[in-house]
Amino acid sequence: MVKRTASTSMITVLRNFEQDPAHHLAGPFLPQTPIGSLTPKRSNSPDIRRRHQPRAVDPFLRWAVVPVASLKVLLVPIILYANWEFVYPILAQSIPRGNTYLSSDIPNPFAQFFLLSHPVPSLDEENLRYQKGWSDLLFIAYYVVFWSFIRQSLSFYVFQPMARYFGIRKHKLDRFAEQGYAMLYFGIMGAWGYRIMGQLPTWWYRTEAFWIDYPHWNMIPELKRYYLMHMAYWIQQLLVLVLGLEKPRQDYYELVAHHIVTIWLVGWSYLINLTLIGNAVYMSMDIPDAFFAFSKLLNYLRAERAKVVSFIIFIFIWTYFRHILNFYILYSVWFEYDLIPDSSKVWIWTNGTYLNWWMKYQVFTPLLLLQFLNLFWYFLIMRVLRRAIVGSEVDDVRSDDEDDGEDEDEDKPLSQSKKDK
């Protein structure tokens, strides 16, 4: 009896996820209300007074929501950098200090905000390498503001006007903009990750290179910039959720936990010099996310045939990247870990070596948990596909159901709205 009850509860939970129109996986593929149609008023529609109101933002955090404010913050280090480049050489030649003049070799202190820091000393400028260091925190902070500027600018000036052009209703503008930004971000970062892997010994998922010649703490410039900008993106996304800058979904806490775990994995892999495997994991996640966001956009645009085709392509891409390739990575961590040089199988901070015997499990466990999460989502995606094939039982359900009632007057013909008044 207990077993049957537990089984019934699990089925109920899965069905709730699958049919929840506000869930970030299932919801976007439920049918959209056609343009100009009447939306029946449901008894369980949320009260208009309960619609999302953005949390009041502290003046010091206006850069997170106002593109002009974030642009001003971004320009400050650039202006200071330019002033230093122009003014300091003059001062170095004209202001004596004792019997000497100021050194003209002092690096520009403002460069570390938006340019890479900690180059490895080398006479070969063509094969420049970088290592990690404390200035990377300034770089990350700068690009948190940068991603806020990009996100809000694209939302206000590109995707929301585009949504209005295609007749998407007012309360779905933010959702459309979110997915447009996600499609561009993951598409660009996925392509960039692909380009970077082509410069690494790990191409195409040559997993033994994750461990051979470890530690890999001398990074090519593109790999370091790619890694830190990814970190900045996830921190910015977490701020958006925590500060309530966008309308929360019903899986709000799930998404917050996901962002925290992602930041932890990115930071940890960067710290222990596992950026090669990190690049492989990143790419396996970014490319499917770009196709997923594209499918959501087609759904908002009510492009039914294109949406179905896109969703099927997305499923194949998700299967290959998030499962097949990730199983390659898991296999490598478990069976190829011993390819690490014996001299590197010790935890010595100054040597950049951290992969002793127990670190194998520290690396394997979070990747395995990530795969379990992907499998759970995959199961939901397959159920959405099955429902799309056999026919959905949900009739005229919006992807943002929590917004219904917010613009009910917009759903009525103009003559009817005037009559009600």
Image (spheres, rainbow, N blue to C red):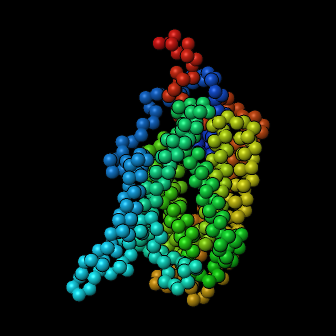
How far across and down, in percent of the image, does residue 119 sit?
48, 78
Which image quadrant for residue 30? top right
Q: Is residue 364 above or below residue 33?
A: below
List the single residue furthest toward the right: 390
Residue with the most extreme left position: 98
In front of the other: 49 or 148: 148
| Picture mark count | 0
Determine which quarter of the picture holds residue 366.
bottom right
Instruction: Choose between 394 and 158: the one closer to the eye.
Output: 158
- Quarter occupied by residue 28: top right
Q: Quadrant of the N terminus?
A: top right
**Can residue 250 be spotted in the picture?**
no
What residue sits 58% from the left and 36% below the top?
163
Res. 298 visible in picture:
yes
Q: Please tell me which residue is depicted at 36% across the width and 68% down the height of the picture.
A: 86
Depth order, front residue of 353/140: 140
Asked if 12 appears above or below 42 in the picture, the reply is below
Question: What residue do we see at 66% from left, 57% from top?
Answer: 287
Q: 86 left or right of 41?
A: left
Of 282 and 27, the residue lying toward us: 282
Return the x and y of residue 203 as percentages of the image width and height.
70, 71
